[in-house]
Amino acid sequence: MALESYLENLKAKPEHIRKRYAFWTSFGVTAVIFAFWIASFTSWGSTSSQAVAQVVDRAGSPAQSLVAGVGSFFVDIKDMIFGAKKITYTSVEVKPGR
């Protein structure tokens, strides 16, 4: 495999070369993520003011947003501590394999 041979060749290089490769690889991945993040701010099919108005309409009043945010925070904390809701099945159907 080409990737495996490339990695083996990279392992044979001195440490400062490996660090340089690691830096530029992480920089490239970060740049791609940053580009997608910046692109997510563009509103497809509507102007910025229309997009903001739609978000404000969905949010409701500030008090409603605050209560909803606090409520979901406590639900998330409860799920982290006690685990998510578990599904229990009352019957099990066994089918023969192929």
Image (tube, rainbow, N blue to C red):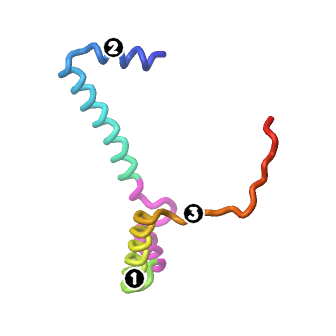
> Label 1 sits on what residue type?
Val
13 lies above or below 81 = above
Residue 93 percent location from the top left of the image: 78, 53
Q: Residue at x 48, y 77 (%)?
A: 58
Closer to the chain start, of discs 3 and 1, is 1
Q: Quick check: 85 left or right of 59?
A: right
Look at mark 2 in the image and give the residue it sits on. Answer: 9
- Spatial CA distance of label 1 from label 2 is 56 Å
Q: Which residues are magenta?
A: 40-58
CB atoms of marks 3 and 1 within 8 Å: no
Neighbourhood count class around disc 3 (C-alpha, 10 Å): few under 14, some 14–19, many 20 upward: few
- Secondary structure category for the residue under label 2: helix
Which residue carries the number 3 mark? 86
- Camera-nearest label, 3 or 1: 3
Q: In the rendered structure, does residue 82 fall within the stretch colored magenta?
A: no
- Residue at 36% from the left image edge and 15% from the top image edge: 8
